[in-house]
Image (cartoon, rainbow, N blue to C red):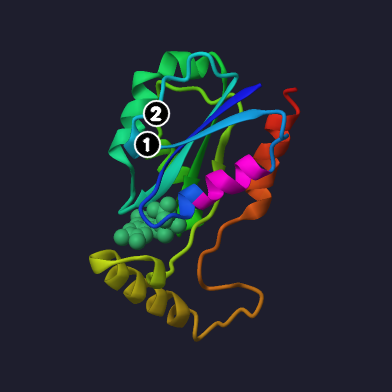
Amino acid sequence: MKVLIIYSTKGGVSRQCAEMLADKLYSSMEVSLYDIKNDPPSPEGFDVAVIGGSIRMGRLNKKLKSYIIDNADLLSHMNTAIYLCCGFTESFDDYVTIQIPKSVTASLGIHCFGGELKPEKLRGLDKLIVKMVRSSLKTEDIDFPDENRSPLPEIVPENIYRLADKIRALL
Ligand SMILES: Cc1cc2nc3c(=O)[nH]c(=O)nc-3n(C[C@H](O)[C@H](O)[C@H](O)COP(=O)(O)O)c2cc1C
């Protein structure tokens, strides 16, 4: 079974999620992993396509969106999953509605893999923005602290593994 995984990333988190997913597939599966920057092949000839990337300033990477639109017909007639990495998972449904092209049907679902806000992995303006967002997230619940809740976003491995289970079940 041939699996195509394409991701867009700026800080590496969406790539990490793609690699975590690939690691959970059977070794007999032929997995091809591509950064959207490196002009990935068409999904034609693959049995499964997984396409994902991060949300930044409310948007999904332009090139990744174009890839989905250009291949919408093919993707809608094969086993396809889409994933998003986002820091503010409560807005996931909105990102799906606004950012995922309507022309595609993802038979394996659209998944939220969480995200990270780690300034040490970033440079320039991104680093500055993340530092500011982190400090506001850490202090905003100071009046109503909740010990059970991490104020900072994290990758959600169980969502990645759930998709891996779905793909393995296709064999
Ligand atoms: C400059 C910047 C803008 C971001 N904007 C959003 C956003 O609008 N919504 C959101 O949920 N997360 C946002 N995030 C959080 C990212 O989605 C999160 O850091 C994700 O893990 C980044 O994945 P990547 O390293 O693959 O690019 C932003 C992060 C950065 C650095």
Q: Residue at x 58, y 73 (%)?
A: 150
Element type at marker 2? loop
- In this view, the residue in front, 108 or 22, is 22
Mark 1–mark 2 CB contact (< 8 Å): yes
Residue under the point 60% across and 19% down? 47
- The residue shown at (41%, 23%) is 41
Q: Nearer the viewer, residue 65 or 33?
A: 33
What secondary structure is marked by label 1?
Answer: helix
Q: Which residues are magenta?
A: 16-23
- In which quarter of the view is residue 46 placed? top right
Residue 62's tag is none
Q: Which residue is mark 2?
A: 40
Ligand 1 is found in which quarter of the picture? bottom left
Residue 164 position within the rendered picture, expressed as x and y whole percent measured from the top left: 68, 38
Q: Position of residue 70 (x, y in %)?
A: 34, 20
State how far apart marks 1 and 2 are (Cα): 6 Å
Residue at numbered disc 1: 36
Q: Position of residue 135 (x, y in %)?
A: 39, 79
